[in-house]
Amino acid sequence: MTDRQPLFDHAAGYRFKPHEMPILPGSPANPDHPGARRAAYLAIGIFIGLLGGSQNGFLLANSGAVQAEFALTPVEAGWLTVAFYSTYSCLSMLLFRVRQHFGIQPFVRWAMAALVAANFVQMIGPGYYPELAARAVAGITAAGLSALTIYYLMQGLPAAMRVGGLVISLGLTQIAFPLTRALSPVLLVDNDMDHVFQFQFALSLLGFGLVYLLRLPPGERKETFEPLDIPSIALFIVGISALCAFLIQGRIQWWDTPWLGYALAVAILCLGGCFLIEAHRKTPMLDLSWLSSRAILSLAAIGATVRVLVAEQGFGASGMFSALGYGNQQLTGYFWVLTGATFGGMVLSVVRLDPKDLTRPVLFAVFVICIAAFADTRSGVMSRPQDLYWTQAAIAFAAVFAMGPIMMEGMLRALAAGQRFVISFIAIFSLSQSMGGLAGSALLSAFHTIRLKTHLIDAGSTLTLGNIQFGQALSNAARRVAPVQSDPALQQQVASSSISQSVSREAAVLAFNDVFFLVGTLAAVTFAVIFVPWLINKIRGRNPLAKELASLEAMLSRTKQ
């Protein structure tokens, strides 16, 4: 790499030294910044990371208020989530090539301008269909902000810690989810979403100003787009969008809805067509021979499985608290605890990151999830958020503690294989995270629904007038109603309704306990599957990433020549 063309920052009149050159085309150079500027880059990177994660975080945290704001049915609200994930899940691949082709500075300007536009449309609230378009644009910009976060963090971190920027970026996105849940009750006055939309717009304007105030250094460009990119990207986007619709709307409309089968068929056909094109290209965006290798497939499977396990928190615990009648205001302290635990997991993941053994933290995280999930099976109708602080904090910690090493291993393998493999890894990692999260929620939701019906049937078979305890409970409930209702028939009706609600609540909690048990079992199986080959490698004294680490070290040494 000693024959690389020199790189100039014409605005600052600076020629970059060999060791300051970007590793990949489309990424910025890494000059030796003074301390104050380095701190500013780091602060902006943290802000952008939280800003990107909050784009979907505020929507999920206030889904009920959004439905009320636009008078939406649950199905219509589900399409808002589909619009976001459809673009967010698959645009990382395209945006990587955009940065390589057009350069980092145009990418920054357009990404931030699109974010401001999307949040402005939300703020003025023109209606449901403009909101759908805004959510789709927000998904694109959120994917772009993930890359910007990494670049700004790497500018702010010392050279020895720059690799930690990948882990911090991932952690900031995960911190944003509980953080938005904790902040939403302060913003959501009288269930009015206007303040939330205004806050998002203000944050996007601030981010827009910060990236213009302190721009990224320039990077190298290269011609990347080819004619075959158009049909390949189009098929990929349509296929992922159909898959997102299947996973999200399946939870809402249930899986036997006829059109869901067509959506799944479209997803299979379109993704199959995309893979067929990529398999026969000389310079594919997705190198299927590399992606189909055992190491990459197992890495993607582990990443997706961890996202499924972490759904115990997003769907399981949150769903149980909702069934028990807790709203965001009663859960503020709970979400602050999760925010702190996620932050702790991010920091410790960076501190303990060891490229020589990236499997150990994943094993530890899966083990923690397993123990916490089994502990949550003790929940009951009298459970309070405080009762789950420790277990849910452990899961929040484990989620980010595991994903950093998984992402790092994939990047090491991609960089060692060659620059063109990075885009393949970005695509597969982004998909494993997004689809793993959606599939996890869909799986646990379907399991919970089945178990809920089972518990209700079991309860219904025992709650008869011949049951002495049920008869006494019905009589007690009727007596409590008597002071405010004199009609005996209405007393019995109100008493029956009260007992029915209590039974439904008890059945819901029992079903969530079954969900926790399922997650604990899956975590135990996952731990065993990962532990066995890791132990074998330890006994043999073999590092599965030895070649990749040697190759990366050689590449870095060439850039310093």
Image (cartoon, rainbow, N blue to C red):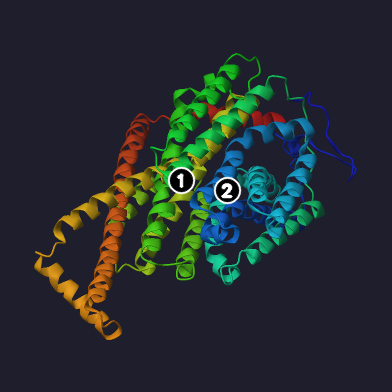
Residue type (three-letter) at the residue carrying disc 2? Leu
Is 16 located above or below residue 285 in the figure?
Answer: below
Is 36 located above or below residue 144 in the figure?
Answer: below
Tell me which residue sits at (34%, 41%) in the image.
527
Residue tagged 1: 402
Residue tagged 2: 80
Residue type (three-letter) at the residue carrying disc 1? Ala
Label of residue 357 in the image: none
Tell me which residue sits at (63%, 20%) in the image.
284
Residue 133: percent from the left, percent from the top? 66, 45
Residue toward you, 476 or 394: 476
Residue toward you, 411 or 321: 321
Q: Name the quadrant containing residue 29.
A: top right
Q: Determine contact: label 2, label 1, CB under 8 Å.
A: no
- Secondary structure beneath dot 2 equals helix
Q: Name the quadrant containing residue 306.
A: top left
